[in-house]
Amino acid sequence: MDRGTVGSAQSGRLLVEVREEGTSAVVTPAGELDHHTADLLREPVEDCLDRGFVRLVVDCSRLEFCDSTGLNVLLGARLRAEAAGGGVHLAGMLPVVARVFEITGAEAVFTVHDTLEAALDDKSGAGDSTADGSAAAGPEGGAAEGRASAADRGE
């Protein structure tokens, strides 16, 4: 597990790698995300949230397919992260995957970035504050810096 890799899961059609990047967990699914492979993404995402990461960046640049089951995994992660004061950022979606988010309207509830670098630079959804404006602890116990999520900004 070099270069900050926290873990990985593989099952022929989907490989999921997870690494820490500052106060974010970067989750990189590669391959096809569908009914048969959804748990391979769900388990590491839930593990990140259970370990205190409330800001997840999903690097979709190697995700070749996503059906409604995969979409539901990401929507569930978004709900959990936002309930904890964070968020889920999607980065680098291939056109075929982006089309699924567009058709379903799911792109409106996620913060979507063209690149992983842009997602990491955007500190919104970083678990930076609670609803009353007080600082919230990041995964290391310190307050995290950030801005309001795209939904909070009315985007």
Image (cartoon, helix red, strand yellow):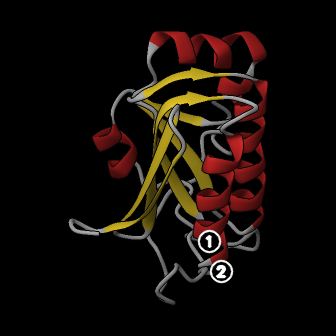
Quadrant occupied by the N terminus: bottom left
Query: Image height check: is 67 above or below 86?
Result: above
Q: Is residue 151 left or right of residue 98?
A: right
Q: Which residue is mark 2?
A: 134
Q: Is residue 71 left or right of residue 17?
A: right
Closest to the observer: 83 or 72?
72
Q: Secondary structure at mark 2?
A: loop
Residue 137 picture quarter: bottom right
Q: Position of residue 148 (x, y in %)?
A: 58, 52
**Does the CB distance between marks 2 and 1 fall below 8 Å?**
yes
Query: Image height check: is 27 above or below 132?
Result: above
Residue 151 picture quarter: top right
Specify few, some or many for label 2: CA neighbours under 10 Å numbering under 14, 14-19, or 20 or more: few
Specify few, some or many for label 1: CA neighbours under 10 Å numbering under 14, 14-19, or 20 or more: many
Q: Secondary structure at mark 1?
A: loop
Residue at image coords 63%, 30%: 155
Q: Which residue is mark 1?
A: 129
Q: Position of residue 152 (x, y in %)?
A: 68, 45
Closest to the observer: 44 or 143?
44
Q: Position of residue 58 (x, y in %)?
A: 49, 44
